[in-house]
Amino acid sequence: MARLKEEYKKDIFPELMRKLKYKNPHQVPKLEKIVINMGVGEAVNDSKILDEAQEHLATISGQHPIITKARKSVAAFKLRIGKPIGCKVTLRRDRMYEFLDRLINFAIPRMRDFRGLSPDSFDRDGNYSFGITEQLIFTEIAYEKVKHTLGMDITICVKCKRTEDSRELLRAFGMPFKKA
């Protein structure tokens, strides 16, 4: 079992149940999935960049990414419907907890000029989204293999009723939010 999942079951779950004053254990917020998306706009001109993005995303997540294709044609960007423009991975269960553990403890502290993640990036369903400007913050990627610095969007989907509950869950996991 993943270390963070074990910690959730033993420590975080009972603490949240007490802190949020829930009587039913099914009301306590829990992680549903993590979606990592890499939009590679330069892939329109050079398909090797997309292959590199796919390789890096597979290394980071431990899962083979799917290629996302353009849904609309945009003449200004020389983009046609169905052209590959990015890749994404959806992590669930143990892989999700292992990725979140590596993200919080190793990757985020390696960000340049990091002062904390925005506590306002929650949507109305309690999901948290943020962007990373370069894939080099992950220790799995060898610096020598990187030809292009690529960013990614990470969405942490939380199953809960209120945004405040979702924020409390991520704080309990150790997510470094900015101090207000």
Image (cartoon, helix red, strand yellow):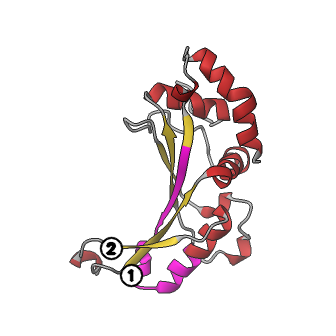
Q: Is residue 113 left or right of residue 71?
A: right
- How many marks the image carries: the answer is 2
Task: Say if the magenta span includes residue 127.
Answer: no
> Amino acid under label 2?
Ala
Q: Which residues are magenta?
A: 32-53
Q: Nearer the viewer, residue 54 or 138?
A: 54
User: Label 1, on which residue?
Assistant: 44
At 57% from the left and 36% from the top, the residue drawn is: 30
Q: In the image, what residue occupies the spot 68% across and 28% down?
A: 12
Residue under label 2:
70
Residue drawn at x 74%, y 70% as measured from the top left: 142
Give how far apart the Cα atoms at labels 2 and 1 are: 10 Å
x, y percentage for residue 149? 57, 69
> Within 10 angstroms of label 2, few (less than 14), some, or many (20 or more) residues?
some
**SS at mark 2 in the image:** loop
Q: Where's residue 145, x and y in %? A: 69, 77
Q: Amino acid at mark 1?
A: Val
In the depicted structure, whether residue 134 falls above or below residue 3: below
